[in-house]
Image (tube, grey):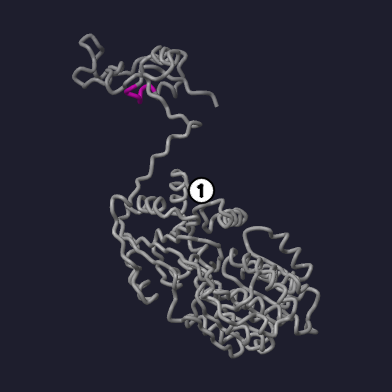
Amino acid sequence: MEDTSYLTKTRFTEFALEPQLLEGLADAGFEYCTKIQAQALPVALAGQDVAGQAQTGTGKTAAFLLAIFNQLLTHPRPESAGPLSTRAVVLAPTRELAIQIHRDAQVLGRATGLKLGLVYGGTGYQEQRETLAGGVDVLIGTPGRLIDYFKQQVFDLNAVQVLVLDEADRMFDLGFIKDIRYVLRRMPPPTERLNLLFSATLSHRVNELGYEHMNNPEEIKIDADVIVAERLLEEVYYPANTEKLPLLLGLMRQTAGDRVLVFSNMRVTCDRLGRALKQQGYTAAVLSGDVPQQKREQLLNAFKEGKRQVLVATDVAARGLHIPSVSHVINYDLPQDPEDYVHRIGRTARAGASGHAISFACEDHAFSLLDIEQYIGHPLARQEISEAVLEQPTRSRPSSDKPRKSPTHERSPKRVEKANARPPRREHTSRPSLNTTDKPRSEAKPATAAPAAPAAPAPLPVAAKPEVARRVQSSRHRTKVEIPAVG
């Protein structure tokens, strides 16, 4: 039986939602609200700004999408709106989160008749530009690509009626704060639009941004004292650096999870883990910032559809992504920021489901464990490492298409015969020089030789040129006269 303990007894039909939205909710299978939806929707539908905080996976996206659609359906298009004016803007910190918001908006707003636009970097530049040039009502995207099109005057912000900032704290971490302020200052004043800010954590700097560009928002916090999901099992191991990979392989064999997310702090580590898991027979994919956007989308879809068992990723996959049925999250490296730990393990145990989070407190990252436990308010369950848990990786065989160089005795007879027929290489250091001038001065000339200091130099050959003669005289190690090349 499906667990519905995370839901409230409040139905969506109790709110003053337009019939088109109720139809979209029915298509999505939503009947009862989550806690953040039950508390934030009445405030937003009344036209009041909201700054909402709730743990990841509790339905924040649906809350602000319903508020956007209802606001646009119940309020006419402003007189200042032109053919290129967008009426609502949703800013997200990552491409994957923007894509997911757009996908959810297509489901919930299917019957509204409102046109959606999606912009993000990495791919589809001309296609996205053409979509915006045709006019959109709701624009969802990342700050960089959105500002790029805005400066080209592909669209304008003169008639924005709703603004949404999703995962604003992550935007600070990624350095988007200047871009966000650039966009907000080109919109109508905060009093003339509905402003919604949702995040898993509301830090002081996020609140400062909200109060600067929002109209006296009402702050709503859900489960502020319980940051981690209730049905999430958290464990920690203390491996040496050399034990991390064998421990990961051993846990993978024991857990046999359907979908496993492995997080690392560095891209190079993700690539190494991806290769190691593939060598052991796992269908693994690697997701990091340097993977092309089109390939990132393909890998995510393959992981969601169960075609990939393991997804090794940096924190690019730790925010806002809803991947169903993730059974295990493994922190191969502990994050330095405790909030990133919460977002990572929030990929499992979503929407009331159970989950398992395993962390490695290794030699390099164990210092982060104390801050993490202090932030979440409870210690992680300590686990011992035994020989039965460790599984050494099997060595991969050399590729057959790149044969190694064979030694001499393994060469073909024809090649060996050819090598033996070569003349021996001269060793200048071991052979005596043919030049008699290389001998000591006392033995440089035999007894029958000319006197050591002749009165006049020996006569030059008739064919030799004067400059050649001078070169012969100045050289003590040449026995032959070399004629310089012409030109």
Residue drawn 35% across the image and 50% down it: 246
Q: Is residue 471 above or below residue 125?
A: above
Of residue 210 and residue 301, the one placed in the foreground of this image is 301
What residue is shown with label 1? 283
243 is within the stretch colored magenta: no
Seen in the picture, residue 451 relative to 467 is either above or below; the reply is above
Residue projecting furthest to the front: 1
Where is residue 12, by image quadrant? Answer: bottom right
Taking the spot 44% from the left edge, 24% from the top edge, the residue there is 467
Q: Is residue 267 left or right of residue 99?
A: left
- Residue 34 location, x and y as percent? 56, 78
- Which one is in front, 419 or 245? 245
Q: Position of residue 426 (x, y in %)?
A: 34, 19
Left or right of residue 329: residue 197: right
Which span of residues is magenta-colored? 472-477
Q: Residue furthest left?
A: 442
Residue 239 horizontal/vertical position (percent) = 31, 57
Query: For mark 1, does the 10 Å Cα neighbourhood hold few (<14), some (14 to 19), or many (20 or more) residues?
Result: some
> Looking at the image, can residue 292 be seen?
no
What secondary structure is found at the residue carrying circle 1? loop
Residue 475 forms part of the magenta stretch: yes
| Amino acid type indicated by mark 1 | Thr
Residue 180 horizontal/vertical position (percent) = 60, 76
The answer to whether any part of residue 219 appears in the image is yes
Quadrant containing the C terminus in the rendered view: top right
Q: Is residue 280 left or right of residue 136?
A: left
Write down the quadrant of residue 232 in the picture: bottom left
Q: Nearer the viewer, residue 151 or 387?
A: 387
Residue drawn at the location 70% of the way across and 68% of the way down:
106
